[in-house]
Image (cartoon, coloured by chain):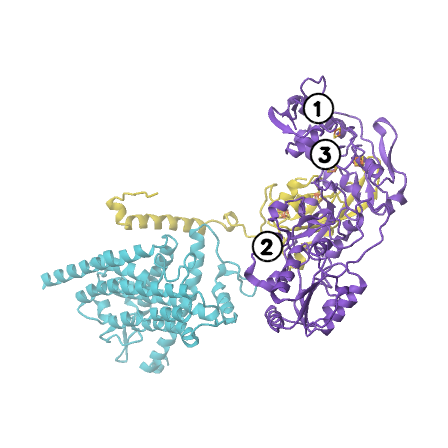
Chain colours: A yellow, B cyan, C purple
């Protein structure tokens, strides 16, 4: 699409527009300069932490039942939904015929590769057991690839969301 | 005691060392101002983390030091297929003219002690090719860029270098012709005479057009935004793509040194050099006046950079050839007619 | 041929078939549980109800024969409501634990429930719970999921006639039970009941919780176990992620229906032979010259040297290798004037009941018989300078083996085309790595003289090449072009992969 823009003589001089623009930028300069650091938009991270909305998608957590056993039934739904192939599950057979709630399957290994994960939250959506959720935890750094593979034991310990 | 030590030779050494140190310091502070200024203009905070002894942040002023140290200790990679000699000397070639030009700039009022005349510039102010010297040496900086891009053996770098050279040639013309106006009205190529001719009325008032052309061309000459097509760091690949570590930072230093020299030249030619009402009666006052003007122009460099977007290459060329050169010619003719009319 | 109307469309169909079979051949889906093409008709699940004009009630499609001028509606509102009702009753006592059910993804009940079922269970009574049982070494049973179609029971009653499973209790408490676990252990066809079960009530212990079926790729191939040529669906695990353990690429074999052969089951030996194709330690991955790994080019130049020596040669074909690869060797022999031989494949005494299992344990033995290739043991002289031996995973008879080994040892240029390291590859000058049967398309001729096609879903490693590539390079565009030439010149008919299709062509 070709769009003809007619510039008036004043526009074609450029200089007035430039001066107006420079006025705008200097206004921002002084505004930021005279704002106290705590009131600026930038949150200076380690000292100040941002209040996250509850739908924020941070580090995963594996929920547990009241008796402390893991809710996950190793159904692979999350691994199937995961667009980044970040979840690895190995299932295990348990022989537990509780009267009301028989259990057959649980994960033997449940590993999330945080270096692959894109924190899309699809795993949470896919889970039929509400076993995996993404929490508000965002201080996730590792010094090596291996530390980025977080296992079931660590995932259980992720702090819950504030709202829960 | 001081007076005894003060011989022209000692004074010369002191001047050279002082100028060199001050220019380099200003380069360092320039990068800091640039980054913090950009941040504030964009409502951000900018680098403020580097702290002295891990405690005193002093607004991130030590960031340039940290950057310098980082650049210094980075691995010095020379890619396999480059022309090694040219590749190494290109940043040096870019940096030297930038500092050399400053030699001709008088940065304070000359004074007499014991009947000897001391002048505050490195080259004697009576050098009667002052303006020419600056224009000649100053335009050599682009060689560093072209050689560097050529030696990189990378087509994108070469394209960046080509852009730089075409741009510098185009704007050099306009710049020189704008200066002709000043030279005409002064009647001399000596910079001290240019300055003294501005006593009372700075050139920027009678030669507003020339000052404007010179000012715009200055941005193009120093490869600063809105004319940073040689480098184009964020969108198009520039001439220093293959460079890293200290060699890369030499290019950055050269850019800032060029800015300082260009700003100093602008101050000298159009803003009355070290002249300032009341302040310039003292030597220190004149130096201060000069520095203040210089810093103001430098700030405008930063300010403009974070206000204007980059020109497209054809727009840049059109502006250079179709607007700047005619304007500088107009300025020249007007000044000439005015002088001829006045006699 | 009679004319009937199905869903208001005129169709002319074979007489003597049931509505369900007619519809299956016409690609009209009628949901069903208890009907199985290889078993008798029970008509107990009521899932296949269709509307037949003139009949007071809905009819079971599986047990109603088509008749002249019949008008059948398979998709009317009444039929849909009936399906919904049947599904609601089935699901009254079904745990719907699809997420942990190994059948999910290929479960009929799951599919039908998605298509026709209701979302919500209206009953408020608790569901009956049974414990998951490992009823035999191979099979586990989860009664909770059973829809009581009795397919498993009928299979064991009618096909293997061993009667290990039966239903017990009555009414809502009916469930199946295993009365003879040992019999199930020893039954060479027992694992079929996991395929036959339309839901996840019977499954293989070996596959339990191993893999979700939707994470695998599926290809249709021919079993390599014997010359019966049973059809297999193979689950391949090709989407390997960085974290996956060394789960082999072949996940399992399950039976594939072949209606033209009327063959719907496979033997357990074939089913569990999948692990043979997961072994990597013994795999020959690079050409080897005198036991040293060499590049493809070096192997190629040795091959060239051998073939240009102009001396007498012998080619030993293999009943374990596909038609295409054998034909490439035959083409070479014809071009160079080499003699062709075949080894005798390994034979095995059959377990009882044998059903369709064949004694000859080689999938392509009938190609050798068809082309009347002489046995290697009947060879008169063994003075050959150039010897090419084809072999693959599987075994041949001892006397053939000894003969071939002596051939290889005498020859100046001995070349073995082999998948795994074997006695052949150790006693030869040049060993060429071959793709295994899941890595290349290929056809096999079974004991019923039916040529069937096996699809290679895996793709072979870069250093491995099929024989026709080694011998003829770019002369052929792929295995299919070899098959075309083979069928034209040796069989006198025109065949290609499309014509062979899924069920094969009888020669
Ligand atoms: S958040 Fe997304 S990418 Fe990360 S594990 Fe879950 S599904 Fe995979
Ligand atoms: S979807 Fe939920 S229950 Fe299933 S494997 Fe993932 S975390 Fe476990
Ligand atoms: S048998 Fe089918 S419907 Fe039932 S749980 Fe398994 S997959 Fe789901
Ligand atoms: S176990 Fe499966 S095949 Fe057997 S009756 Fe139940 S649902 Fe049918
Ligand atoms: S399939 Fe017809 S009644 Fe079960």
Q: Please tell me which residue is depicted at 32% across the width and 66% down the height of the picture.
A: B165
Q: Position of residue B16 (x, y in %)?
A: 36, 76
Nearer to the camera, B304 or C246: C246
Name the residue tied to disc 3. Answer: C109
Q: Please tell me which residue is depicted at 35% across the width and 51% down the height of the picture.
A: A22
Q: Quadrant of residue C61?
A: top right
Q: Is mark 3 within 8 Å of ligand 3?
A: yes
Q: Earlier in the sequence, mark 1 or mark 2?
A: 1
Name the residue tied to disc 1. Answer: C82
Q: Is residue B198 visible?
A: no
Question: At numbered mark 2, what does the secondary structure look like: helix, strand or loop?
Answer: helix
Q: Is mark 2 within 8 Å of ligand 5?
A: no
Q: Earlier in the sequence, mark 3 or mark 1?
A: 1
Q: Earlier in the sequence, mark 2 or mark 3?
A: 3
- Whether labels 3 and 1 share one chain: yes
- Whether labels 1 and 2 share one chain: yes
Q: Position of residue B31 (x, y in %)?
A: 43, 62
Nearer to the camera, C163 or B150: C163
What chain does mark 2 sit on? C
Q: Which mark is residue C485?
A: 2
For the N terminus of chain C, the image quarter is: top right
Image height of B143 relative to A164, above or below: below
- Whether labels 2 and 3 share one chain: yes
Q: Residue furthest front?
A: C380
What chain does mark 3 sit on? C
**Label 2 environment density (alpha carbons within 10 Å; few <14, some 14–19, many ≥20):** some
Q: Is residue B105 left or right of residue B206?
A: right
Question: At numbered mark 3, what does the secondary structure look like: helix, strand or loop?
Answer: helix
Per the model, the C-alpha gap separating discs 1 and 2 is 54 Å
């Amino acid at each position: 699409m070709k769009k003809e823009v007619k510039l008036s003589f004043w526009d074609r001089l450029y200089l007035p527009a430039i001066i107006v623009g420079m006025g705008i930028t200097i206004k921002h300069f002084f505004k930021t300069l005279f704002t106290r650091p705590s009131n600026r938009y930038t949150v200076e991270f380690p000292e100040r932490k941002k209040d996250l909305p509850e739908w924020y998608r941070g580090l995963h957590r594996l929920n547990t039942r009241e008796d402390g056993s893991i809710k996950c039934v190793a159904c692979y739904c999350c691994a199937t939904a995961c667009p980044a192939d970040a979840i690895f599950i190995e299932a295990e057979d348990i022989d537990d015929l509780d009267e009301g709630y028989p259990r057959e399957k649980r994960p033997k290994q449940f590993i999330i590769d945080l270096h692959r994960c894109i924190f899309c939250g699809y795993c949470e959506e896919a889970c039929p057991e509400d076993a995996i959720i993404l929490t508000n935890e965002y201080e996730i750094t590792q010094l090596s690839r291996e530390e980025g593979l977080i296992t079931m034991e660590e995932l259980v310990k992720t702090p819950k969301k504030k709202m829960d | 005691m001081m007076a005894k030590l003060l011989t022209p030779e000692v004074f010369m050494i002191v001047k050279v060392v002082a100028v060199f140190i001050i220019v380099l310091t200003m380069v360092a502070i320039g990068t800091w101002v640039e980054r913090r200024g950009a941040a504030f203009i964009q409502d951000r905070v900018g680098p403020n983390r580097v702290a002295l002894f891990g405690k005193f942040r002093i607004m991130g002023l030590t960031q340039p030091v940290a950057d310098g140290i980082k650049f210094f200790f980075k691995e010095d990679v020379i890619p396999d297929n480059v022309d090694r000699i040219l590749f190494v000397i290109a940043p040096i070639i870019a940096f030297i003219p930038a500092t050399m030009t400053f030699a001709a700039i008088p940065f304070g009022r000359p004074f007499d002690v014991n009947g000897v005349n001391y002048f505050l510039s490195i080259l004697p102010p009576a050098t009667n090719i002052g303006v020419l010297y600056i224009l000649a040496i100053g335009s050599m900086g682009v060689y560093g860029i072209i050689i560097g891009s050529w030696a990189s053996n990378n087509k994108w770098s070469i394209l960046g270098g080509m852009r730089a050279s075409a741009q510098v040639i185009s704007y050099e013309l306009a710049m020189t012709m704008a200066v002709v106006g000043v030279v005409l009205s002064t009647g001399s190529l000596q910079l001290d005479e240019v300055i003294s001719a501005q006593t009372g009325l700075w050139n920027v008032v009678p030669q507003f057009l020339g000052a404007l052309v010179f000012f715009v061309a200055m941005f193009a000459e120093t490869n600063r935004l809105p004319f940073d097509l040689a480098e184009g760091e964020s969108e198009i690949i520039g001439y220093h793509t293959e460079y890293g570590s200290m060699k890369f930072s030499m290019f950055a230093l050269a850019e800032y040194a060029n800015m300082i020299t260009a700003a100093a030249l602008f101050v000298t030619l159009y803003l009355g050099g070290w002249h300032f009402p009341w302040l310039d009666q003292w030597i220190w006052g004149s130096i201060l006046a000069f520095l203040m003007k210089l810093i103001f122009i430098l700030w405008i460099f930063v300010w403009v950079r974070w206000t204007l977007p980059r020109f497209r290459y054809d727009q840049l060329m059109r502006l250079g050839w179709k607007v700047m050169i005619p304007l500088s010619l107009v300025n020249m003719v007007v000044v000439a007619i005015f002088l001829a009319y006045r006699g | 041929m009679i004319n009937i109307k199905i869903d208001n469309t005129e169709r002319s169909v074979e007489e003597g078939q049931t509505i369900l079979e007619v519809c299956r051949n016409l690609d009209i889906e009628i949901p069903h549980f208890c009907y199985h093409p290889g078993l008798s008709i029970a008509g107990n699940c009521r899932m296949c109800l269709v509307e037949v004009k003139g009949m007071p009630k809905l009819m079971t499609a599986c047990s109603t024969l088509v008749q002249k001028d019949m008008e059948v509606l398979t998709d009317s509102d009444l039929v849909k409501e009936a399906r919904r009702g049947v599904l609601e009753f089935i699901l009254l006592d079904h745990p719907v634990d699809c997420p942990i059910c190994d059948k999910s993804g290929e479960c009929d009940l799951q599919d039908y429930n998605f298509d026709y079922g209701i979302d919500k269970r209206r009953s408020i009574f608790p569901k009956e719970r049974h414990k998951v049982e490992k009823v035999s070494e191979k099979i586990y049973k989860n009664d909770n999921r059973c829809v009581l179609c009795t397919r498993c029971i009928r299979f064991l009653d009618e096909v293997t006639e061993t009667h290990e499973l039966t239903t017990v209790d009555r009414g809502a408490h009916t469930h199946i039970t295993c009365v003879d676990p040992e019999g199930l252990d020893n039954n060479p066809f027992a694992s079929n009941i996991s395929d036959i079960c339309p839901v996840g009530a019977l499954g293989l212990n070996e596959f339990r919780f191993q893999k979700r079926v939707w994470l695998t790729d599926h290809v249709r191939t021919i079993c390599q176990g014997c010359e019966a040529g049973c059809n297999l669906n193979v689950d391949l695990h090709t989407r390997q992620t960085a974290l996956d353990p060394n789960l082999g690429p072949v996940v399992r074999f399950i039976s594939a229906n072949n209606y033209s052969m009327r063959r719907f089951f496979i033997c357990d030996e074939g089913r569990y032979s999948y692990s043979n194709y997961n072994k990597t330690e013994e795999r020959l991955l690079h050409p080897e010259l005198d036991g040293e790994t060499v590049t493809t080019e070096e192997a190629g130049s040795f091959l060239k040297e051998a073939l240009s020596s102009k001396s007498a040669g012998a080619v030993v074909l293999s009943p374990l290798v596909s038609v295409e690869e054998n034909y490439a060797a035959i083409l070479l022999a014809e071009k160079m004037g080499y003699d062709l031989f075949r080894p005798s494949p390994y034979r095995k005494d059959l377990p009882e009941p044998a059903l369709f299992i064949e004694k000859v344990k080689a999938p392509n033995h009938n190609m050798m018989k068809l082309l009347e290739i002489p046995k290697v043991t009947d060879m008169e002289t063994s003075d050959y300078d150039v010897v090419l031996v084809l072999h693959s995973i599987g075994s041949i008879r001892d006397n053939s083996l000894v003969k071939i080994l002596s051939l290889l040892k005498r020859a100046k240029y001995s070349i073995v085309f082999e998948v795994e390291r074997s006695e052949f590859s150790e006693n030869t000058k040049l060993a060429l790595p071959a793709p295994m049967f899941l890595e290349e398309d290929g056809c096999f001729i079974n004991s019923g003289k039916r040529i069937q096609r096996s699809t290679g879903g895996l793709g072979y490693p870069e250093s491995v090449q099929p024989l026709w590539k080694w011998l003829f390079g770019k002369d052929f565009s792929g295995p299919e072009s070899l098959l075309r030439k083979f069928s034209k010149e040796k069989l006198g008919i025109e065949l290609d992969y499309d014509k062979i299709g899924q069920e094969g062509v009888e020669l």
